[in-house]
Amino acid sequence: MNYLTHLECSLNGETYPFDQIHGLSPAGRPLLARYDLAAVKAQVDREVFATRNDGFWAYRELLPIQDWPGVPRLGEIKTPLIPLNNLHGEQLIVKDEGRLPTGSFKSRGLALAVARARELGISKLAMPTNGNAGAALSAYATRIGMQSIVVCPADTPQINIEETRMQGGQVELLDGYIDDCGKRVRELVAEQGWFDFSTLKEPYRLEGKKTMGLELAEQFGWKLPDVILYPTGGGTGLIGMWKAFQELTELGWLDQAKLPRMVAVQAEGCAPIVKAFQEGKDEAERWDDAQTLAAGIRVPMAVGDRLMLETLRESNGTGVAVSEAEIVSAWKSISQRDGLLMCPEGAATYAAYLKLLEQGWLDADEQVVLFNCATGLKYPLP
Ligand SMILES: Cc1ncc(COP(=O)(O)O)c(C=O)c1O
């Protein structure tokens, strides 16, 4: 049974059919997939998800897929929740996305987007990436016989470049940032007939990221933690989880009305969303000279800026920027105290946690989830 009904412009609510190819809406904003949630509520029991063992594909009634036998599968799992007992006790919990195929949460969004692209008859996928997304795109595209090319900054972690090529994706390196890579992708689209697969520029990657929120709800017994700290680059995960919580609320599937406060964590060397949040703005300005060792969150400008800022405000959340020294120190203490090798982006969330604790923005007895979006093994270690 499929419940997808249409796509909706995130700016003005205009609607579009889902069986046609779409990029951004005519207003230049991301399109959101909408479902017949009343029918889902009437026909689906939330307990069914725990009985399925195919990872994020388990939430199929809330996903846009039309042709289930055709989806690319590489052994998806529901990722574990790991409390940092030694550092902080049971209330500080890491959601370890590094256990997914391709070693990062990018599997979720790209598997969904690739599957939908195939259904819509698209075969050549082009995307800018800071690394992990490119690896996930090449893996899932290759899995179902599609072509992929990614453009990434020349100083992207070497392993990401190599794994992408090894899995059959083409890689172009460019001396610049991810938004410069996005411009090169637009040239490839215009000149060589590739489809622009940039995050939020097609509607379905967000639906994959949404499964992080659905999975958290299921794992927490249909209650949600008090606070979620998310390492924020393009922000698709932040926006996707918030969309999941809205859908779950509409479905009446959450056993408590209060939703988590969402926190965008960025590096001091590239913090456009934190800055815009602190200045009370609705849109972010491009961050010049972006620098951080946490490559995944080095995003000077994001098309989802408005949606991210809305999410932070609606959820009573906040934005926190952390220094490179704080990231490295957090990275080491989690590894050395709890034996969990995070990625630097994930470590940044622990550094932010410590800041928020010190500022009194959160209490030690609140239940907090830190997102570790990739395995630490993909990075040169400090
Ligand atoms: C490890 C890691 N963490 C966080 C992010 C940021 O994710 P998002 O684009 O959803 O903000 C990325 C994106 O590349 C990443 O690779």
Image: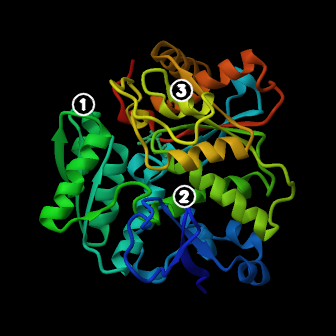
Circle 2 sits on which residue? 77
Circle 3 sits on which residue? 348
Choose the circle earlier in sequence order: 3 or 1: 1
Q: Where is residue 99 in the image (x, y as percent from the top left)?
A: 50, 47
Q: Quadrant of residue 377?
A: top left
Q: What's the mark number on residue 52? A: none
Q: Where is residue 331 in the image (x, y as percent from the top left)?
A: 51, 22
Which residue reaches farthest left?
Answer: 191
Label 3 to label 2: alpha-carbon separation? 24 Å
Asked if 356 appears above or below 137 in the picture, the reply is above
Q: Give the amino acid at mark 3.
A: Ala
| Quadrant where ligand 1 appears | top left
Choose the circle earlier in sequence order: 2 or 1: 2
The quadrant of the image that shows the C terminus is: top left
Q: Is mark 1 on a helix, strand or loop?
A: loop
Mark 3 crowd level (few <14, some 14–19, many ≥20, 10 Å Cα):
many
Q: Nearer the viewer, mark 3 or mark 2?
A: 3
Mark 1 crowd level (few <14, some 14–19, many ≥20, 10 Å Cα):
some
Q: Position of residue 285 (x, y in %)?
A: 44, 35
Circle 1 sits on which residue? 155
Q: Where is residue 177 in the image (x, y as percent from the top left)?
A: 29, 35
Q: Quadrant of residue 363?
A: top right
Q: Give the amino acid at mark 1.
A: Asp
Which residue: 41% across, 63% down?
A: 24
